Image (tube, rainbow, N blue to C red):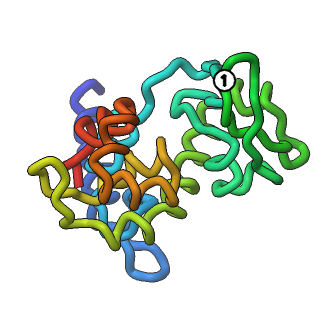
Amino acid sequence: MLAVVPVGIVALLVGLSLGTGRRGLTMLPESPVRGILIVRWTRFRRLMARHPRDYDSAGRLGAWGMNARSLHDAGLMEAPKKITVGRDVGVWSGDWKKPLSKEKFLGSLPLQARGFELATQKLVPAASSLVGSIVDGKTCSLSGLLGVGHVAGAAGLADWVKNEASRKKFEKTTATFNLTNGVF
């Protein structure tokens, strides 16, 4: 009986790798970023998840530290705007789309992961146009630029690439670039 289990697992894996769906595509999971291998996407996603699931600090929420601007890009929030919270100026805030709430978002790692995927997909066009740029002697990859875009937004991405002063001023953004550059 025990010999049947490994054979069954091998058969399942072979079937998944050879099996095709209705459109002739493999049935293995796909990356949300077109043309990127799922193993590279998974590595990038893990590198970007730097907080606990219930993280809530200065307008950044969840494992991926998403703000209202990126949650809006993911279709989870409406009316993103910058506000002041205590001593923090320029904190992104917005209104959750019903039936979502901050509590539901922080309570669901799958929802956070999907939000991260959708927001990242929105950044791809802005980041793709900058792939190959040289920043501080390093060639920018798509993953490095998506990491920057996650922290700085699409508008801040181009400025970060072109402006050395921005790279020095926003150390966390630069650290994110260094962490994720070259994954894909």
Quadrant assignment, res 42: top left
User: Where residue 104 sits in the image (x, y, percent)?
Assistant: 78, 30
Q: Residue furthest front?
A: 165
Mark 1 closeness class: few <14, some 14–19, many ≥20 residues within 10 Å: few
Secondary structure of residue under mark 1: strand
Quadrant assignment, res 57: top right
Camera-side residue of 101 and 31: 101
Camera-side residue of 152 and 100: 152
Read off the residue under disc 1. Answer: 88
Up/down of 26 relative to 47, above or below: below
- Which amino acid is tagged 1? Asp
Answer whether residue 145 is visible to the viewer in this image: yes
Residue ID at (53%, 18%): 52
Q: Count numbered badges in the picture.
A: 1
Up/down of 108 relative to 53, above or below: below
Residue ID at (44%, 31%): 49
Quadrant assignment for the C terminus: bottom left
**Horizontal relation, residue 84 to residue 50: left or right:** right
